[in-house]
Image: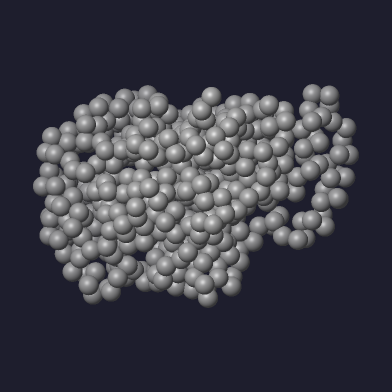
Amino acid sequence: MTTLRNDTTTSETKTQRTDNAMQRTSAAPTARNDRLERLRTRLDGELITPDSPAYDEVRRVPVVTTPFRRPEAIVRAANARDVAEAVRFARSEGRPIAVRSGGHSVAGQNMVDDALVVDLAGMRRVSIDPARATARVAPGANSGELMAAAHAYGLALSTGDTATVGIGGLTVGGGVGFMVRKHGLAIDNLISAEVVTADGEIVTASATQHPDLFWAIRGGGGNFGVITDFEFRLAKVGQVLGGALVLPASHDVLRGFHDCVATAPDDLTTIANLMQAPPAPFIPEGRVGELALMILAVWTGDLAEGENAFAPLRALAEPIADAIAPMPYPVIYQFTAPQEQPHGAAIRSMFADAHGDATFEAILEAMAEPAGPKSMVQFRGLGGAFSRVAPDATAFAHRDRRFFTTVLGLWDPGDDAPRHWDWTNRLWEKIRSDAAGVYVNFLADEGEERLRAAYPAGTYERLVDVKNTYDPENMFRYNQNIRPRS
C-alpha cells in the first residue's frame, strides 16, 4: 500500500494541537472577532481572515468567472474534525458557508462574499491498496495526484479531463473523464464516502450505511454535506494508446467524428475541441491558428486493436498532426495542461442525442469569428459503460444520452469578459434546441429551469427528499442548489 499524506491529518498533528492553541491565543482577540478566535483554537488547520498575510492568495480561484470575492474567513481544513467544527460554528452563528475543493466551480460558488469558506485544498491524502485495487482519497487531492499514485500499481480511476480539478467537486457532480466509455463515471466506482452533515456529524455513506445519502452524493452536488474522504474501486490500466489527433475543421469532419464515436468500441473515449490550433509542440508552426478539431483520445484495450479503432477518425481528413501513441495513462493530462492556468470561462453546455446540419453550420460560423483565440466548442461521445448504469441508480440520471457538447468562451485574466459571454450566449441560443439535459458540473448560474434539466423527472423530487432529511435548513446552498421543501 502506498500513501501520499497530508502534513496535518496524521497522528503527529494531535500532539501539536495544544501547542498550536497556545500560540494562537497568545494575542488577545478583539471584541469583533472573538468568536472566530475561539474557532481558531479548535482547528488543526488554519483560520485565515482578511488581516492574514495569506488571505489574498488563498481566496484566488483558477476559474475567474466572477469578481474577486472576499469571504469573512477561510478554514483551511486539515481533517474531517476541522470541517465539522467549521460547520457547527457557521450553524451556531447563522453564517453562510461555502465549500472549496479544487476551486474549478463553473458558477463561482466556492468563494463567497462575507461567508465562512471551508477550503479542502490541504486535505490531499491518497492511499492505494493494490491488493484490493481501491483508493482512499481526500477531497482536496486532484486527478493528477490520484492518477500518479494509482499508476504505480497499474491502476487508474475514470476522473476528470484536467489534472488540477479537485476530486471532491468533480465526484459529487458525476465525474466525466478520459475513460468514461470503458469504466463509467467516477461515481460509478465510488464504494463509500465520509460525509460531514449540516448538523456537524461525521457519517459514512455507502450502499449499506445511509444509502439515501449515498445515492444523492453521486451526482447531486454539494447539497447534502461536505465529503472528507472517498473510497474508490480502481481499474487495471497501465499503458494506453492516446494523445491528440488534429484534423482540419469542416462540416464533414464534425459529422464524421460524431458518427465514429457513436459506434466506437467501449475502450475508446474521446474529447474533441473545435478551436484554433494552439502553439503546442505537436502542431506544425505553419498550422497554428487554423480552425481545427483537436481530438483528445484514450484507448484502454489491446494496442494493436486500438490502431484499428483510430482508423475511421484518421480517415476523416488529412491530419494536421497525429500525436496518438502508446503512453502511461497519466500522460494524457499533459494535453490539457494549458487549461490549468487561471482563466475566465463563459460556459453553456448540454447533453444531446444528435446534432443536425444546422447545428454544425451555426458552430462553424461562430468559430470563424470567435471572441478570442481560446474560444472553442467541445464534443464528447458517451455510451459504453456510462450507459449501462440504471438511470435511477445514482442522482446522475442522463445515462441514455449519446453526446455531451459545450460552448466555451475562454479568456485570460484582464480580458473583456462581456465580449466572451456575448459570443457564448449567441451561439448557445442557436444550438440549444438540441439539448436533452445538462451536466451539473458544467452549469453556470443559469436559473431554476436549467437546474431542473440536470435532474430528469423523479430525480429532482427524490433529491429534495434527501435534502429535507440531511439539510432541511439549506446550510449547503452555495452550489447548484436543491432547495428543501418549506
Q: Nearer the viewer, residue 430 or 279?
A: 430
Picture coordinates of residue 266 (x, y %)?
27, 62
Q: Nearer the viewer, residue 466 or 233?
A: 466
Picture coordinates of residue 439 (x, y %)?
36, 41
Q: Nearer the viewer, residue 199 or 376?
A: 199
Q: As displayed, is residue 56 above or below residue 45?
A: above
Q: Residue at x 66, y 48 (%)?
A: 202
Q: Residue at x 68, y 32 (%)?
A: 91
Q: Nearer the viewer, residue 34 or 342?
A: 34
Picture coordinates of residue 323 (x, y %)?
27, 62
Residue 26 in view (yes/no): yes
Q: As displayed, is residue 219 above or below residue 68?
A: below
Q: Residue at x 58, y 35 (%)?
A: 471
Is residue 316 rendered to the left or right of residue 16?
left
Please tell me how many numbered marks the rendered image carries. 0
Q: Residue at x 18, y 43 (%)?
A: 354
Q: As displayed, is residue 9 above or below residue 25?
A: below
Snapshot colouring = one colour
Residue 122 in view (yes/no): no
Picture coordinates of residue 431 (x, y %)?
22, 32
Question: Which corner quadrant holds the N terminus?
Answer: bottom right
Q: As displayed, is residue 277 above or below residue 71?
A: below
